[in-house]
């Protein structure tokens, strides 16, 4: 089995989950809300980060057979990468949605 396909699928999964809070008005894509506040969107984004992080550790264990020990820098980089992944959804929700709605 080639190890790069699960990694690319995981990166795509992380990109999608990072954008879900801003693209959907449902809480965790399950419960409809009339209006989702900014704090709730950030909380949901952080929970998606935790879920993606757990999936990443499980994937590493499945592919490599063990998990590597990491320092605090690794966790900061993964959080920043998840924030960069969320940028398209954030820009759409707070900027483009208003511009496209006015046309």
Image (cartoon, helix red, strand yellow):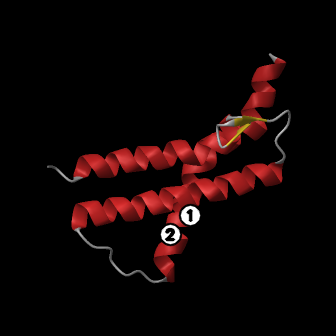
Q: Nearer the viewer, residue 89 or 35?
A: 35
**Residue, disc 1:** 80
Residue 59 showing in the rendered view:
yes
Up/down of 16 relative to 60, above or below: above
Residue that lies at the very extreme toward the front in this rendered image: 31
* Location of residue 52 with respect to 35 vertically, above or below: below
User: Who's the residue at 32% across and 64% down the image?
Assistant: 60
The residue that disc 2 covers is 77
Compared to residue 2, the image places residue 61 above or below, namely below
State the image quarter where residue 33 is shown: top right
Q: Position of residue 21 (x, y in %)?
A: 67, 44
- At mark 2, the secondary structure is helix
Q: Give the residue at the far top of this rendering.
A: 103
In the image, what residue occupies the spot 27% across and 73% down?
A: 66
Q: Can residue 92 be spotted in the picture?
A: no
User: Residue 70 versus residue 28: which sits nearer the camera?
Assistant: 28
Q: Is residue 52 above or below residue 87?
A: below
Instruction: Give me the residue at 24% from left, 60% from top.
Output: 63
Question: Residue 19 appears in which quarter of the rendering?
Answer: top right
Report, in whole angstroms, how far the alpha carbon at label 1 lies from the one at label 2.
Answer: 5 Å
Task: Report crowding for label 2: few under 14, some 14 to 19, many 20 or more residues within 10 A (C-alpha).
Answer: few
Percent of width and height locating residue 72: 51, 82
> Residue 27: image x %, image y %?
71, 42
Residue 17: mark: none
> Which residue is rendered at x = 84% and y = 46% of the image?
37
In screen coordinates, is 5 left or right of 75?
left
Proximity of marks 1 and 2: CB atoms separated by less than 8 Å: yes
């Amino acid at each position: 089995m080639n190890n790069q396909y699960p990694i690319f699928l995981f990166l795509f999964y992380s990109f999608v989950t990072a954008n879900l809070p801003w693209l959907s008005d449902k809480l965790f894509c399950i419960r409809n809300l009339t209006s989702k506040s900014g704090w709730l969107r950030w909380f949901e984004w952080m929970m998606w980060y935790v879920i993606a992080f757990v999936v990443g550790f499980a994937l590493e264990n499945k592919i490599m057979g063990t998990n590597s020990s990491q320092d605090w820098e690794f966790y900061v980089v993964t959080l920043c990468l998840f924030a960069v992944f969320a940028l398209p959804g954030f820009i759409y929700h707070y900027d483009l949605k208003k511009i496209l709605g006015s046309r």
